Structures are given as structure tokens and as C-alpha cells.
Amino acid sequence: MGRKSIAKDRKEKNKKVEKWTQALLPKLKNADLGNLTMDNLAILMNKSKSTIYQYFTTKEEIFEYITQVRVDQLNTYKNEISGDNLQLDYHYQALASILTEGAKDISPIYLKQLQKHYPDAWKIIEDFLNELLIDLKQFYVFGIKNGLFKSVSVDLLAKLDEYFIMQLITDHSFFSQTKETMESVIKDYMSLKFEGLTK
């Protein structure tokens, strides 16, 4: 058994902490998150356990923080699909770029493990994805209404997004049968979706 952290005030997390916690992600692509200890995480972050305990109390808190930082970065997509910025010459590349960058260093295995072992961290992702689905549906409605997109079923588009976003990204069996990465699949999906929709 590793030592328990002593209850005390934690230091304010800063860019430095953000950097070394985000650097964990590529090292966890195929890890069994349920078996990781604070010792393991300290080694992977190349930090002493005492340094980690200055900022975090538990493994759960570390994974929630890592997830929240990435989701905060992803939330810049809102500027790309807002009505104020939507013009006839809108290109999906900006949105695709944000989402593919958000998926960088993340594997379906990691997401499935996060869902299983760290439900609070997974809830952050789930809430983000549900909000993204709502925003995309509104985006399709706006695009069709303003002549940017072909007149197709918004409900069908939303259902396709729901399947892709909520099921495919955690389907490690699909990714194990292809050489595609999460980033490449998101990029291809966005390309097919918006090039097919655009008039």
C-alpha cells in the first residue's frame, strides 16, 4: 500500500502543472488505468510523489484535472460554429482542426478505461460531447436556413454525429482493425460531413 496523502491545502495549479499532466496522455494510450497507482503516475510524470501531492489529493483528481484542461481547450470550437462567425465561405477545417487537436494522444482504449475507472472524469467528457451534439444540430439548422448547407434531414445528421461521437470514439475493436488514429478518423469524418453538406 502506498502512503496516503495528508489532508492539507493544495497549491494552485499553473501552466507548469498543466504541461506535465497533459504529457501523461501519450503514455496512457494502452494503460490499464484501474491498476495505476500514485507511484506509477509520479514515475510517468517524472515527478516525485511529494510534488504531486502538493497539487493533487488522489488519482481521481489527477484524471479529472487532465480531462478538464483538454475539454477547456476543445471549447474554443464554439467560436467556430457561432452565428456571428458563420459566413458562406465558412470552412469546416477550423472546427476539424480543433477537434482533432483535442483528440491528440488519446486512444479509444484510454477513453474506455477512463469511463470504467474514473466516472467523474468521464462525466466531464460526456457533458462536453452532449453539448457539442446540441451545438452541431443548431449549426446544421442555421446552415440550411441560410443556404450554406444542402437541405437534408437535421435529425439524421444529428443521429450520425451521436453515433460517431458517443460510440465510435470508445470502440477500441474498430481502431484495432485499422491503422487510423482518433485524430485521423475525426478529420475524415468532418471532411465527409461538411464537404457533403456544403452547396
Image (tube, rainbow, N blue to C red):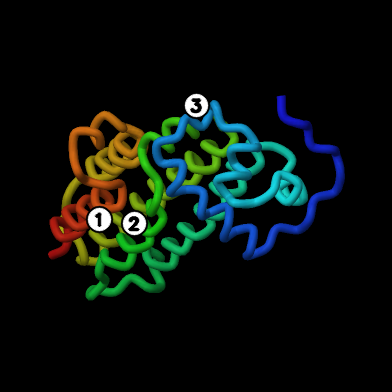
Q: Which residue is the extreme one toward the top?
A: 1
Q: Where, by quadrant of the figure, is residue 109 drawn?
A: top left
Q: Residue at x 28, y 51 (%)?
A: 186
Q: Which mark is residue 100?
A: 2
Spatial CA distance of label 1 from label 2 is 6 Å
Label 1 sits on a secondary structure element that is: helix
67 vs 31, left or right, is right
Q: Which residue is mark 1?
A: 187
Binning the other alpha carbons within 10 Å of mark 1 as few (below 14), some (14 to 19) or many (20 upward) gives: many
Front-most of residues 23 and 166 = 23
Spatial CA distance of label 3 from label 2 is 23 Å
Quick check: 86 above or below 34?
A: below
Counting from the top left corner in percent of width and height, residue 116 is at 49, 26
Q: Are marks 3 and 2 in contact (CB under 8 Å)?
A: no
Q: Are marks 1 and 2 in contact (CB under 8 Å)?
A: yes
Q: Which residue is mark 3?
A: 116
Q: Residue at x 49, y 43 (%)?
A: 125
Of callouts 1 and 2, which one flags the residue occurring earlier in the amino acid sequence?
2
At label 3, the amino acid type is Lys
Spatial CA distance of label 3 from label 1 is 26 Å
Counting from the top left corner in percent of width and height, residue 112 is at 42, 31
